[in-house]
Amino acid sequence: MPRNRPGALRGARPAPGPRFWKEPPPARIPGLSARTSLAIHRAERLSPGFWFSRGATETALRRYRAFLHPPGNRPRYPRESYCPSCPGCALDDVRQARDALADILPLLPPRARAELRRAVTPLDRRYLRLTLPDPLAGPAAPWWHRRLAKGVEGW
């Protein structure tokens, strides 16, 4: 049986048109590479869940950095969010922001996961150094929830 020539096969297909994106490309997350930022945005878009809205990881990372940014070695006390049931307001609590970062890590490809982990690890060390342990916290909670907190943040 004779086979078709490659040119005949290519001629049978319609020519590809220009590519149009339905939305603009995502912005690069400060402190991370463009490849990792794209992987994070892709994971946020494809994953259902409480934290996974567009830009939630960037907001959580920014919130975590802002909590630890003021100079000095005075103890810091995380505050609960005024409205913890909505994803936007929940990130006012730095512990919830750290939860969001922990939840996105397993969804990323290995290189992006390693880069995000390298960005979060020094922040974790500083958080552990600047916050005080809560003796009444349950052992089942993640370590960042077992730190002393006070009051409500937000409104």
Image: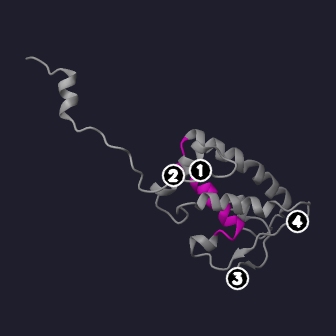
Calculate the distance from the C-alpha at mark 3 to the C-alpha at mark 2: 33 Å
Secondary element type, mark 2: loop
Q: CA distance from mark 1 to mark 2?
A: 21 Å
Q: Say which residue label 4 marks.
A: 75
Q: Amino acid at mark 4?
A: Pro
Which percent across, then down, holds residue 103? 58, 56
| Distance in Å between CA atoms under marks 3 and 4 | 23 Å
Gap between marks 3 and 1, in whole Å? 30 Å
| Quarter containing the N terminus | top left
Considering depth in this image, is 122 or 149 the residue closer to the camera?
122
**Image quarter for residue 104?**
bottom right
Q: Position of residue 72 (x, y in %)?
A: 92, 60
The reply to whether residue 141 is in sight is no
Q: What is the number of the mark on residue 25?
A: 2
The residue beneath circle 1 is 105
Q: Which residues are magenta?
A: 91-109
Residue projecting furthest to the bottom: 155
| Res 114 seen here | yes
Residue at numbered disc 3: 155
Q: Are marks 3 and 4 in contact (CB under 8 Å)?
A: no
In the image, taking residue 69 as reference, residue 9 lies left or right, namely left
Does the segment drawn in magenta span residue 100?
Answer: yes
Question: Could you tell which of marks 3 and 1 lies nearer the N-terminus?
Answer: 1
Dot 1, crowdedness within 10 Å: few (<14), some or many (≥20)? some
